[in-house]
Image (cartoon, rainbow, N blue to C red):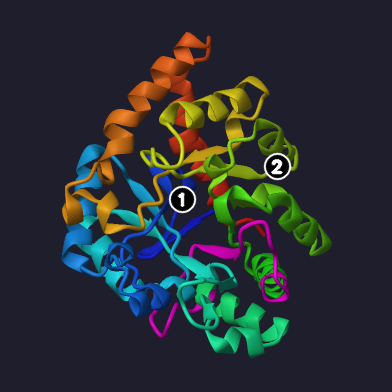
Amino acid sequence: MSFVRTMTGDIAPEEMGFTYSHEHIVCCPGHWLERGEDDLLLDDPVKSENEVRLAKEAGVKTIVDATAIDYGREPQAVYDIAVHTGMQIIGTAGFNKGFLWDAKMPGETRTYNEWIGQASIEELTQFVINEVEVGMQGTGVKGGQVKFGTGYNSMSELEIKTIRAVSRAHLATGAPMHAHTEAGTMALQQIQILKEEGVDLHNISFGHMDRNPDTYYHCKIADTGAFLCFDGIAKVKYNPESVRIKCILELVKRGYQKQILVSGDTARKSYYYSYGYALGLPYIKQEWTKRLIEEAEEAGINGTQLVEDIFVNNPRECFTFKK
């Protein structure tokens, strides 16, 4: 039986509706707390709940919260928001990425807890399985996808170990997989390890693809059957929207329309309307999709069908448990 695992229970894939595939709702990463980087702390559940409610009112039905345990995940708080708003929220088991170096900080600052480095692959695998089948961080809130990640143009031994552990947890549970790629790099290297572990690449989405707007690279990833997530919508400081849309349309022209996901990765107060009067979660549904349709039609592509695939049909396929 096919199902999607949300924080409030399993649902049929057909119930997902309009879906954001990579967001953050409540998270307080330890390394940002240590630095006093307040903008990177989504630490007010009331404001976050208001933002999710605005998205629900705009027509968003499901949100994938991509926050892993080593990025300050707060599963109970996000579960409460799901209950209060009626939003279907998918939680994330597994890990984010390995070591984070900062020349301004003395020594080494880790995004992983020390125990991750000390644990065996078998122990990490069982940890992720438990997050999917029992609950995350002592709650009964179960993860609906499993995640790993790597750094910018780099892959540490620690990160390789978590890729293997998450792959094995995926094979044991059938949970969909998600890969963090720092600035859109290292996806092809991640794929080599996933193949070694026997993972069907159609069961994984690669995040931050618009941070590396390279169509050749995107096509190499898409050739494996994987999903590509363009999750930097409205972040003009990285690339103008025209760059993202061009990358998406180029993939469509090459036959990969059924493998594209879109979201905002709103992991800062300054991205949220409810924290800082920014465009916020409703923006993609209310405004950005209109531009995508317009530019798609100008390119001879059915824009309405493209939006339906990106936000409804593709997430339904991507986030369904397969075993």
Q: Position of residue 206 (x, y in %)?
A: 60, 50
Image height of 101 relative to 185, above or below: below
Q: Say whether residue 98 is left or right of residue 308.
A: right
* Percent position of residue 242, x then y: 45, 26
Marks 1 and 2 close (CB-CB < 8 Å) = no
Question: Residue at (48%, 34%) from the top-left corner?
Answer: 310
Residue appearing at x 70%, y 86% in the figure: 120
Residue 33, numbered label: none
Tell whether 16 sits left or right of 197: left
Is residue 193 magenta-colored? Answer: no
Q: Secondary structure at mark 2?
A: helix
Q: Position of residue 222 (x, y in %)?
A: 69, 38
The residue under the point 48% across, 47% down is 13
Which residue is under mark 2?
Answer: 221
Q: Amino acid at mark 1?
A: Ala
Residue 169 figure quarter: bottom right
Report the quarter where the C terminus lies. bottom right
Quick one: 44 or 214, which is closer to the camera? 214
Q: Please rate how many residues cluster around mark 1, counting C-alpha atoms within 10 Å: few if below 14, some from 14 to 19, many from 20.
A: few
Q: Quadrant of the N terminus?
A: bottom right
Q: Quadrant of residue 90?
A: bottom left
The image quadrant that residue 160 belongs to is bottom right
Residue 17 seen from this side: no
Q: Which residue is mark 1?
A: 12
Magenta-drawn stretch, dominant element (helix, strand or loop): loop
State how far apart marks 1 and 2 are (Cα): 28 Å
| 66 in relation to 206, above or below | below
**Is residue 140 within the magenta segment?**
yes
Q: How many marks?
A: 2
27 left or right, relative to 129: left
Give, as a single range, the part of the protein colored magenta: 133-160
Q: Earlier in the sequence, mark 1 or mark 2?
A: 1
